[in-house]
Amino acid sequence: MPTQDMLGREVHVDDEGFLTEYDEWDEKLGAELAKNIGVAMTDEHWKVITFLRTDYKSQGTTATTRRVDAVGGFPVKLQFQLFPAKPAKKMAYIAGLPKPAGCV
Amino acid sequence: MANTQPIVPNFGSESTGRKMAIICSKGNLDMAYPGLILGNAALGEGVEVHLFFTFWGFDMIHKKRQKKLKFSPVGNFAMHLPIGGIRMPQWLAWIPGMQPFATWYLQHEINKLQVPEVPDFLDQISASGGHLWGCKMSADMNKLTMKDLREDVEGIITAADFIEMTDGAQVLFI
């Protein structure tokens, strides 16, 4: 598993650049990850990311867009507005989580 | 050794230019799902998606009927019993009450995976920017109009309209 230097510390990532260690993430790093993929973070973005982090901790898997809507209460339409074109992957990347594994 | 150059996933541009057309021609509960799952997945990957509902698939966008799609194990030789994984004998598929039970059971298993029921799934597809179209011939045959269909159906169109509209798209027939 490669590591890379981000904000002066070494973090573990997979071949695509998704963080692999839950505890290596913090908000500063999240902001940096968002910058990497051109997402300008607002309070609304952070609320979604916080939900994903909390949900992952209790479920052990990354929430799909469906779950972010049904359980998190963030409508799919909003997710597409905040994280255009590929919301599931972009949210997971910024939240320092693996890509969601569910089909729906 | 830490990489100096950060690895950043390639999410492509906001518009992938990729277009997909899914023809949903079946109205049984089990056959309603493949098109919805693939269409939803494609939308999540930034693909422009058009769903065209025709023949029995027309029930999927009918306001009332879309809530009552059924599943039957009759003629389905890949149907296995929930216990032991034994293939269901066809004489059992015909017994009274099997169709409602099988419908309930299939929906129950789908719900367990947190996959939405058909009307909610179409809501999600529509909210994700998917386009829904009804087939003109199916509407005429069933004497149905836009009034009978979900609000988010964009129109009832002919086969030729559909072909024109999906120029350059990848087409899936289900």
Image (tube, grey):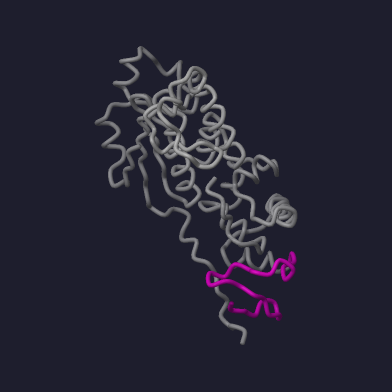
Q: Residue A24 placed where, x, y %?
A: 72, 71
Residue A50 horizontal side relative to residue B101, left or right: right
Q: Is residue A91 above or below residue A11?
A: above
In the rendered image, which quarter contains the N terminus of chain B?
Answer: bottom right
Residue in front for this viewpoint, A16 or B71 = B71
Q: How far across and down, in percent of the image, does residue A51 sit?
A: 72, 51
Does residue B160 appear to the left or right of B5 in the view shown? left
Q: Where does the image place residue B64, in percent across and percent down from the top left?
A: 51, 18
Q: Residue at x 58, y 55 (%)?
A: A100
- Frontmost residue, B101 versus A61: B101
- Residue displayed at 43% across by 21% down: B94
Q: Which residues are magenta?
A: A1-27
In the rendered view of the protein, which quadrant contains the C terminus of chain B?
top left
Which residue is nearer to you in this view: B134 or A101?
A101
Q: Of all residues shown, which one is farthest toward the bottom?
A: B1
Asked if residue A58 lies in the magenta stretch, the reply is: no
Q: Please tell me which residue lies in front, B86 or A82.
A: B86
Residue lying furthest left:
B160
Residue A32 placed where, x, y %? 66, 68
Pick out the residue farthest to the top: B143
| Residue A95, above or below B135 | below
Residue A9, placed above or below residue A28:
below
Q: Residue at x 52, y 41 (%)?
A: B128
Q: In this figure, what is the number of numbered marks?
A: 0
What residue is shown at x 39% (from left), y 33% (from top)? Answer: B76
Q: Is residue B143 left or right of residue B160?
A: right
